[in-house]
């Protein structure tokens, strides 16, 4: 009896469809298996009081194969990319990048957890096509894609910046650089379809 | 005279206007020549969490352009710095991503060989220019000014250059200017700026914590690195924080180059202070040189 037959009916650890392998194949998620569950990431996290499942637990859930629970939870979208976990992790796992890998999988596979951060990332990513970010335009597009009334809260900030000439009202000029960015993105998309799917 | 390739970043064109003005004025005094990278584009930071490969490839375009100049690439914005650095590290060290990125760059006739040194401007001030040179240029020592030096995230984490747990370079710079750097625990704390738009409740609480901690430790003003996002986030949200938490902060937020400019004898207008939001006149009035 071969080794494969023994493990066969139960777990095929190299199965690319296992959630843990999917995360490990995503840039940033490579070291998910090396976590020792010490909890330094959760303890260091700037925003852990808002997470339903904190970083250490997210990693445990990934390894337990709880894909639906992880990807439908808004937890990972509370990551503010401060990288405290990344500089402290004793195993060098880069938990912030791992969390971003989970966010990327959720976005790509069409999960839409209850958070406004994913629409924000999407509008930011889409506005890169202009070459440079035009904040006013990007944020207007974002507010239209969620609840436009939430823009009211940001008005004092916007007004204070505007009256001091710190809010750019016109979009940046289209330069050769912007065309280059569009070409790079198209090339990446064509590479993605050639290799059939992921990343 | 020292030469650098300068990557301003998108935020310098809008909320970073006062910081860029002060940076240019101070660079002139310190004999730094900042050559703006020609036709630079976004660093790839926006939306990076949901698409790492896009982000790295778009940053790589700027790196490839900088490689042609043969100069160190300096960024004042901490986010841009991290993202350019991240692209550099990923391309040179990750065999799965590097070739893909160069493949994508070939669509626009560029190639990145990994030969750029990405640096933050604070690093340049401390290690290239030197604290002695900065101190020697001071005309109006900022004696008696207690500053909370606040580093934010990406100047120190995850790629350095300063210590990620207890950064000191900004403290050393303001001390070279004659000011006093107060010690407070949250000096490398995150302000939540990345999610101020999408989750204001969370971001405002983080700003409140930061201001509260700085004020508790006796700071009269806050000194930031050159990051326009850190600067504008704490500067422009202070009234919202005050309303929400019934607090009464009026903590001027001053970029390190604005402080340098004042100490070098420049006028507030020359360092863009007229565009700051929180009133700074009371704190800085003893140091303003009156010009005839």
Image (tube, grey):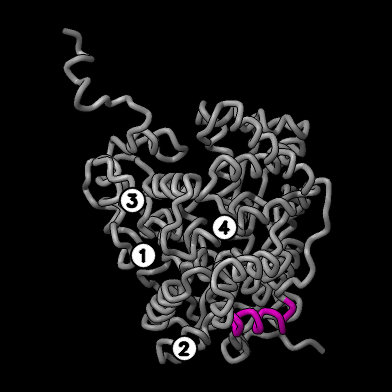
Same chain shared by disc 3 and disc 2: no
Residue B206 percent across, percent down from the top left: 41, 73
In the depicted view, which residue is nearer to us: B254 or A25? Answer: A25
Tally of marks:
4
Answer whether labels 3 and 4 touch (C-beta < 8 Å): no
Label 2 residue SS: helix
Label located before the other in sequence (4 or 2): 4
Pointer 3 and pointer 4 on the same chain: no
Point out which mark residue A47 bears: 1
**Coordinates of residue A28 in the picture (x, y in percent):** 44, 40
Q: Nearer the viewer, mark 3 or mark 4?
A: 3
Same chain shared by disc 1 and disc 3:
yes
- Residue annotated with mark 3: A70
> Could you tell me how far apart the alpha carbons at marks 4 and 2 are, in whole angstroms?
26 Å
The residue positioned farthest toward the top in the image shown: A1
The residue sitting at 61% across, 53% down in the picture is A125
Query: Of callouts 1 and 3, which one flags the residue occurring earlier in the amino acid sequence?
Result: 1
Q: CA distance from mark 2 to mark 1?
A: 21 Å
Residue B171 visible in this rendered orientation of the protein: no
Q: Which residues are magenta?
A: A154-165
Q: Chain of mark 3?
A: A
Tag 4 and tag 2, C-beta contact below 8 Å: no
Q: Nearer the viewer, residue B230 or A10?
A: A10
Q: Secondary structure at mark 1?
A: loop
Q: CA distance from mark 3 to mark 4?
A: 30 Å
Q: Which chain does the numbered disc 2 sit on?
A: B
> Does residue B78 appear left or right of residue B248 in this picture?
right
Secondary element under disc 3, as helix, strand or loop, is helix
- Chain ID for label 1? A
Name the residue at 33% across, 51% down: A70
Q: Which residue is mark 2?
A: B242
Q: CA gap, disc 4 to disc 1?
A: 20 Å
């Amino acid at each position: 009896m071969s080794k494969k037959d023994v493990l066969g009916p139960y777990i095929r650890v190299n199965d690319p469809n296992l959630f843990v392998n999917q995360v490990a194949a995503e840039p940033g998620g490579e070291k998910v298996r090396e976590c020792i569950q010490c909890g330094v990431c959760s303890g260091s996290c700037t925003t852990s009081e808002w997470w339903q499942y904190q970083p250490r637990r997210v990693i445990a859930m990934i390894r337990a194969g709880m894909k639906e629970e992880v990807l439908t939870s808004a937890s990972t979208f509370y990551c503010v990319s401060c990288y405290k976990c990344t500089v402290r992790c004793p195993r060098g796992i880069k938990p912030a990048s791992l969390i971003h890998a989970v966010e990327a999988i959720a976005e790509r596979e069409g999960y839409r957890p209850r958070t406004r951060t994913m629409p924000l990332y999407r509008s930011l990513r889409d506005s890169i096509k202009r070459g440079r970010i035009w904040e006013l335009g990007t944020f207007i597009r974002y507010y239209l894609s969620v609840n436009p009334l939430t823009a009211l809260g940001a008005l004092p900030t916007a007004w204070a910046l505007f009256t001091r000439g710190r809010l750019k009202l016109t979009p940046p000029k289209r330069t050769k650089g912007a065309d280059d960015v569009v070409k790079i993105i198209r090339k990446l998309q064509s590479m993605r379809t050639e290799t059939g799917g992921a990343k | 005279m020292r030469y650098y390739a300068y990557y301003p970043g998108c935020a310098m064109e809008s909320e970073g206007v006062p910081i860029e003005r002060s940076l240019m004025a101070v660079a002139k005094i310190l004999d730094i020549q900042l050559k703006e990278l020609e036709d630079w584009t976004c660093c790839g930071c926006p939306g990076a969490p949901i698409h790492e490969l896009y982000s790295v490839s778009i940053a790589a375009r700027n790196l490839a352009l900088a490689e042609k100049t043969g100069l160190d690439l300096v960024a004042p914005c901490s986010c841009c710095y991290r993202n350019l650095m991240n692209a550099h590290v990923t391309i040179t060290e990750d065999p799965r991503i590097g070739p893909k990125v160069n493949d994508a760059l070939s669509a626009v006739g560029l190639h990145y060989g990994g030969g750029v040194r990405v640096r933050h401007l604070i690093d340049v001030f401390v290690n290239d220019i030197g604290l002695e040179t900065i101190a020697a240029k001071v005309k109006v020592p900022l004696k008696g000014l207690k500053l909370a030096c606040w580093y934010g995230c990406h100047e120190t984490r995850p790629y350095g250059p300063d210590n990620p747990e207890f950064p000191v370079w900004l403290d050393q710079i303001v001390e070279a200017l004659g000011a006093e750097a107060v010690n407070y625990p949250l000096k490398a704390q995150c302000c939540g700026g990345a999610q101020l738009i999408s989750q204001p409740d969370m971001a405002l609480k983080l700003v409140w914590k930061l201001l509260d901690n700085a004020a508790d430790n006796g700071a009269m003003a806050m000194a930031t690195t050159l990051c326009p996002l850190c600067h504008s986030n704490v500067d422009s949200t202070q009234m919202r924080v005050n309303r929400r938490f019934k607090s009464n902060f009026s903590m001027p937020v001053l970029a390190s180059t604005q402080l340098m400019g004042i100490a070098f004898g420049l006028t507030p207008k020359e360092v863009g202070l007229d565009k700051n939001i929180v009133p700074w006149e009371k704190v800085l009035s003893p140091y303003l040189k009156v010009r005839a």
